[in-house]
Image (tube, rainbow, N blue to C red):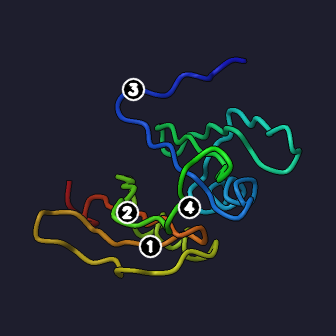
Amino acid sequence: MENQGPTTGLTPHIAIADKRASEAIDFYKKAFGATELARMPADDGVRLMHAHLTINGASLMMHDEFPEYVDNESSPPNGVTLHLHVDDADAWFDRAVAAGASVVMPLDNMFWGDRYGQIKDPFGHTWSIGGPIKGEK
């Protein structure tokens, strides 16, 4: 299959609970303009063993949870934030919220020079969105 390698750098690989990985792909397309490169169904015909998306030029790998292959249940995702550095933080943030993300931290101009905020997707993953403050380079 073509385009299976991740983009350069670190590539997050997230698990989606409750057999909702296909739904998550649709959400990431709508919220972040994701491009789907691969989708591999599991033998059960319901869950996804693997999916590869690109968002803003970077890879995101994902799969449905498979509790039958691990010793303990997954907990809700927390402690990790997926960051998107974009050209227009307001546009990206607003699109994600319109797609169904909930606001964790409203966008604001930050002391380090970015316009920055955080959202939570419908699958429990926290995303931060940052970019240049409008009118600054």
Dot 2: element: strand
The amino acid pointed to by label 2 is Ile
Residue highlighted by disc 1: 119
Say which of 93 and 74 sits in front. Answer: 74
Dot 4: element: loop
Front tag of 2 and 1: 1
Q: Which of the labelled discs sits on residue 8, or is there none?
A: 3
Residue 22 as seen in the image, left or right of residue 133:
right
Say which of 38 and 32 sits in front. Answer: 38
Q: Which of marks 2 and 1 is nearer the N terminus?
A: 1
Q: Answer whether labels 2 and 1 touch (C-beta < 8 Å).
A: yes
Dot 1: element: strand
Separation (CA) of disc 1 from disc 4: 25 Å
At x 62%, y 37%, the residue is: 52
Q: Is residue 108 above or below residue 51?
A: below
Q: Earlier in the sequence, mark 4 or mark 3?
A: 3
Say which of 120 and 106 sits in front. Answer: 120
| Most distant residue in the left direction | 111
Residue highlighted by disc 2: 129
Front tag of 1 and 4: 4
Q: Residue 83 falls in which quadrant of the image?
A: bottom left
Give the percent coordinates (x, y) of residue 90.
41, 70
Front tag of 2 and 3: 3
Residue 25 as seen in the image, left or right of residue 79:
right
Dot 3: element: loop
Q: How many numbered discs, if any?
A: 4
Q: Earlier in the sequence, mark 4 or mark 2?
A: 4
